[in-house]
Amino acid sequence: MEQTSVVHKTIVVVDIESFGDPRRTNGDQVVARDALYRVVEQAFTQAGVSWDECDREDRGDAVFVLAPALVPKAPFVEVVPTALATALREHNTASRPEEQIRLRMAVHAGEVAYDEHGVTAASVISTFRLVEAAPVKSALAQSPGSLALIVSPWFFDEVVRHSRVVDPATFRPVEVAEKETTCRAWIGLPDHPYPADPRHLADSGTDSSAALPPTGSPVGGATVTVSGTTTMRGSAIAGGNVDQSRRTRIGVGGLVLALVLVSGGITAYRIGDDRIVGTPFPASPTVPIGSAPAASPTTGPKVTPRTDAPTRFEPTGVPSINGVARGTVTLAEDRLLYITSNGVNAVDPGTGSPVGSVGPVGPAVEDHDPDGQPRPPAVVEVDGRKAALAAFPVLVAGSGTTPDSVRAELVAMDIRTGKRLWTTNLAVPGISPSFPRVFVAGATATTAVVVAGAETTNHTSYGVDLASREQTWKLDNFEAVLVDGEVVAGRSATEGYWDQYAPFEVKAANANSGAQLWTALGGRERLRLATFGPSRLLASDDGPGSDDSHYTILATATGISEQVPGFDTTRDVEIEACSYDGRSTTVCQFRGMLMGYDATSAALLWTLGGSSDKSGRLVPRLNSTWNGALYGTLHDRGPIVLDARTGRDKETSPGGAPDLVNEYAAIQLVRKTERTWTVQFLDITR
């Protein structure tokens, strides 16, 4: 290490659990040490922290790292732990038990003195005491995950507590008493978080001195060290030998820039910068002072839900959202959710304000399939929270003659807070980095179904347990399309090749176990599947050797085709869409005709248009249905609301025709380009 003066550093120590276990041979320890360095370097790189610019010391069963002062501290809790847990899972999955490792990671920051032998500092000693503390060892021993993170009281108060990516309520305070170090530190489990409990944040248990940053800290908060023990908070300066003439240059509470006096001049550091260096997803927006507090992560929406279907709307002043792919948008409670190539996003439809965005931790694949996200996020209960699930392709860089490849990254976002709950990775062999398709087809209460493939590559579907975040099953040559109850239905190529003209069959499996249930409609070209209603799916295809469209209703439990009026003919029929109202009725849009069905029995309830309808009424275009109402648009007359159960007019001047509506919100989707839409919010007035 180059000998320098005392400098400020972020301090990281990562230690292998039970490295000296007698079951490990010398060879096993070599593999474990190699894995330690590999996964830590990989995590730093994903966080945008240059491994080459960090000072490092080997400690046998641990690695000691000092990051440069100018490197932002947030990535060390927002990106590095998650990336480290992911890399650990990949190593352990591919390794013998004796070569598998679990890690403890301690993070602190402070002044570090260099000499000809290395480094020394009270802050360095404190960090080693943290990583060896009994509470973090116990936390890892009791965790089903592979990583336990412990941070110093200062690092928690100044970095973790203010993070917009990790939830500080998932950390737990612990008392550390190791030799000369006594403090209250904070433990988090990145790959198996504690349930969020904001009560722990109400009283951090640290005194005022513990909340101060390490001497000379150049970032964070509104506390600045001028020299020696001289510290300024807001406009108050404490300590000796203070040059009061410099007070205005240093600043007062609320300034955006803090000017820190250092040898050689004045260095400016931004306070409150939301930019997260090295992460592929945007930071959450700043909440204006005086705005309403966000809902607690353990509670539901703050808005009272409607019990009846709305019938009157008007444009709102809420800004629109541009550049959204139609198939990726959904409403869940009082949240608008949508997916982009960068992440899953949550928006408050009442204000249009972003709630949060969570994206993959790994590097993005440059060549994205524009249709690679054909589904909206799946919304399920995870650890007592309503979560949005989405999956993304991330790049695995090759080396030498090994080409680049792809892995799938599944993320879970708390829809209330917009923060990451967890991230897990799946190996998806055989998928090229050129225009991959990775998405979540749906989820049950316990399992997410992830699909990976490409336009001309056989698709594979995976089951991921939501509690352990581990893969539980895999089905090759199967593109899952929808999850209905505990059944996942999709399509499988029957001739060994995969493109839009390949012959397919419908296949279904148990979504929790992956066990195959049935197959149907073999040898069908351009096979497409959609939900018809609970316990039924709609299959459309061109049929063997035919250019005519075929439409079939299948029972999702058995695969048996059902005779349903309107779907029992193969010619002169074109079905544009079907919409289930979430209660009792499914409405289908045929060319020039609407038909309403009982969602339970599939019995025909009414017909509007077509040769059998003698009423002469105009046929609207179907926008959506919800809770007994059909929202449509009449050519030259505009929006209209029908009774979904009877087909009769319900409101002739509704003021809008939402494409998505629920008990909290309504939105319209306006086409902007061939592939993108603009989300426009509607006020519900009645």
Image (spheres, grey):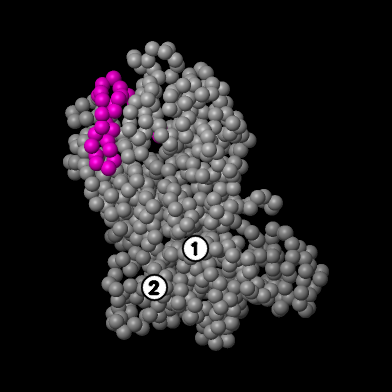
Identify whether 592 is placed above or below 359. Answer: above
Residue behind mark 1: 195
Label 1: how many Cα within 10 Å (few below 14, some 14–19, many 20+): some
| Left or right position of 596 against 336 | left
Task: Farthest residue to the right: give it.
Answer: 245
Against 334, residue 605 (above or below) is above
Q: Which residues are magenta?
A: 552-580
Viewer-nearest of discs 1 and 2: 1
| Front residue of 102 and 205 | 205
Return the residue found at the far bottom: 179
Q: Is residue 16 visible?
A: yes
Q: Which residue appears at 49% of the width and 77% of the height?
A: 135
Displayed quadrant of residue 617: top left
Image coords of residue 336 (percent x, y): 51, 43
The reply, left or right, for residue 41 in relation to residue 655 is left
Mark found first going from the N terminus, 1 or 2: 2
Q: Amino acid at mark 1?
A: Pro
**CA neighbours of label 2 inside 10 A, class few (<14), some (14 to 19), many (20+):** many
Give the amino acid type for the residue marked by disc 2 in the picture: Arg
Q: Position of residue 33 (x, y in %)?
A: 36, 76
Alpha carbons under labels 1 and 2: distance apart: 21 Å
Residue found 78% across the figure and 78% down from its top: 241
Quarter placement of the C terminus = top right
Which residue does the numbered mark 2 point to in the structure image? 102
Disc 1, SS: loop
Looking at the image, residue 327 sits to the left or right of residue 110; the answer is left
Any part of residue 76 in sight: no
Give the percent coordinates (x, y) of residue 432: 31, 50
In the displayed structure, would residue 341 be above or below residue 200? above
Front position in the image: 276 or 531? 531
